[in-house]
Amino acid sequence: MSKDTIILGIETSCDETAVAIVKNGTEIISNVVSSQIESHKRFGGVVPEIASRHHVEQMTLVLEQAFDEGQITWNEIDAIAVTEGPGLVGALLVGVNSAKALAFAKQKPLVGVHHIAGHIYANRLEQEFDFPLLALIVSGGHTELVIMKEHGQYEVIGETRDDAAGEAYDKVARMLGLPYPGGPHIDRLAHEGKETIDFPRAWLEDGSYDFSFSGLKSAVINKIHNAKQRGEMLKDEDIAASFQASVVEVLTKKTLRAAKEYKVKQVIVAGGVAANKGLRTALANAFSETDIPLYVPPLSLCTDNAAMIAAAGTINYWNGKRAGLDLNANASLLLK
Amino acid sequence: MNVLAIDTSNQAMGVALLKDDEIIGEMVTNIAKNHSVRLMPAVEKLMTEVSLTPDQLDKIVVAKGPGSYTGVRIGLSIAKSMAWALGIPVVGVSSLEVLAYQGRFFDGYVFPFFDARRGLVYTGIYQSQGSRLRLVYEEKNLSMEDALLKLKEDHKKVLCLSPDIIKHKDSIHRVLGDLAIIPEGPFHIANPGFLGLAGLYKEADQTHTLTPNYLRLAEAEAKWLQAQKENK
Ligand SMILES: [Zn+2]
């Protein structure tokens, strides 16, 4: 590459309004995230209409901050990358339409990015990819295993058939009366408790890389109900530890098996649940016994951000992929 | 001064380009098709047609609602981002005011409204005054019945303007009788040229703080506030 490629990334698929500027898909120039967690807390989850309202209020502020912090001018920007899906449609629409307006106003190429591709590429901001690689994506909306043989090529080998791992975390947290978002609270409690309850592990059919967490979620709920009826005392810490042990074991074993079967050179973890200490530790232990390197991005790159969208968008841009001004938000966009 | 006016707040999608107070291009569709997909291509096409480039724009005027929440946000996202990137002022104009322009020379009350479901409407009462439209009753989300009863008290002629006029025709006639004037089809669709004109005379908004004119809280928010009240 003779000249640097500088991409402006925009992400609004859920409850973070994010803008970032990234050089060559590997170097963050600026990365601004305006989180709405405080606004959604009182509702116990993300309310789509409220998320959309926030995005439209925050967008130009976040854009300006990204340019200010990066000390970058429009002349230096090569293209604009935006999350086109999947996600909350009303939220996505704000980012997509802002990106199109910017692309037209400044006459810059526009590139659409799949949100999960973004999560995967968050890792490239830390560590160059080595193909074939396996990515485990775990978040409130996703639980997927993806094989990549080259840049910009994705093969989904496993995904959840019901709840995403993060969703199960949030639901169990709610049962335990923990505040939203519940994932970090469960993780914290799990470390204080012991695995005293043998919750089910959903392995599914032989050889399947798919996941299922709704059975586990129901088992936890039933356990809590039954204990209450019998006047039995269950420690929240132990419930959290037992629940987390089930989730982590399934995720870890399937990831390890896939890594071996596909003979990958690298395993990367992505998505909000990648911040989970229990999962990080279990994966690190499992892969320490192999010669396959495991990478988990730093916390700030696990959760939704726009640097990851700019990073993934850089590859699309290099591959000549362009979106038109008729680009639309696609709530159920597939990863290809 | 080159002004771009955009309206995606309701079903009719409008784009207009003005040179000072003269229309140089205009496009309106009134079909139930995606504004998100169609607005930017329409802006690009119209600008190419009249040989204007984005950096020649001096001001952007946007219909800020009420209307479809999503539609309003598409318009504002585009207007704000474009204005910010080009470093030019942006002006938000109430979608009701834009519609009221269709009755700009009417002697009496101009009553623009949008259906807000469950018997409710978004409305405000305007009146022609010199070269401007003056807001007589503030914009609100209220029941059509209440709006009509209030109008009746003033014994003035009322020009009713709404893309949802058919749905409310009967109740308008029932309550207002001869006071109501309901014009033909084209009068009920907001005109983006008038949006540009309205914006021309208004002070620019702060790009960062320009927000939609929803006239209604998000449902979750309203319920939450209600629950807080009941708990007290
Ligand atoms: Zn995400």
Image (cartoon, coloured by chain):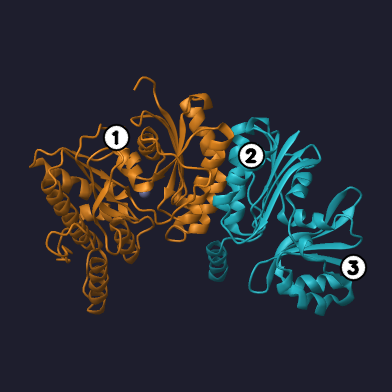
**Quarter holding residue A209:** bottom left
Q: Is residue A287 above or below residue A233?
A: above
Element marked by disc 1 = helix
Pointers 2 and 1 in contact (C-beta within 8 Å): no
Chain A colour as displayed: orange
Residue B99 visible in image: yes
Q: Which residue is mark 1?
A: A124
Between B140 and A132, the residue placed more toward the observer is A132
Element marked by disc 3 = loop
Pointers 1 and 3 in contact (C-beta within 8 Å): no
User: Residue flagged by tag 1: what amino acid is it?
Assistant: Arg
**Residue B100: % across, % down:** 79, 57
User: Residue flagged by tag 3: what amino acid is it?
Assistant: Lys
User: Residue flagged by tag 2: what amino acid is it?
Assistant: Thr
Q: Which residue is mark 3?
A: B157
Q: Which residue is mark 2?
A: B207
Mark whose residue sits in front, 2 or 3: 3
- Chain corresponding to cyan in the figure: B
Q: Is residue A317 above or below residue A169?
A: above
Between A232 and A143, the residue placed more toward the observer is A143
Mark whose residue sits in front, 2 or 1: 1
Residue at x 66%, y 42% (from the top left corner): B46
Pointers 2 and 3 in contact (C-beta within 8 Å): no
**Residue A220: % across, % down:** 24, 68
Q: Residue furthest front?
A: B49
Residues under labels 2 and 3: Cα distance?
38 Å
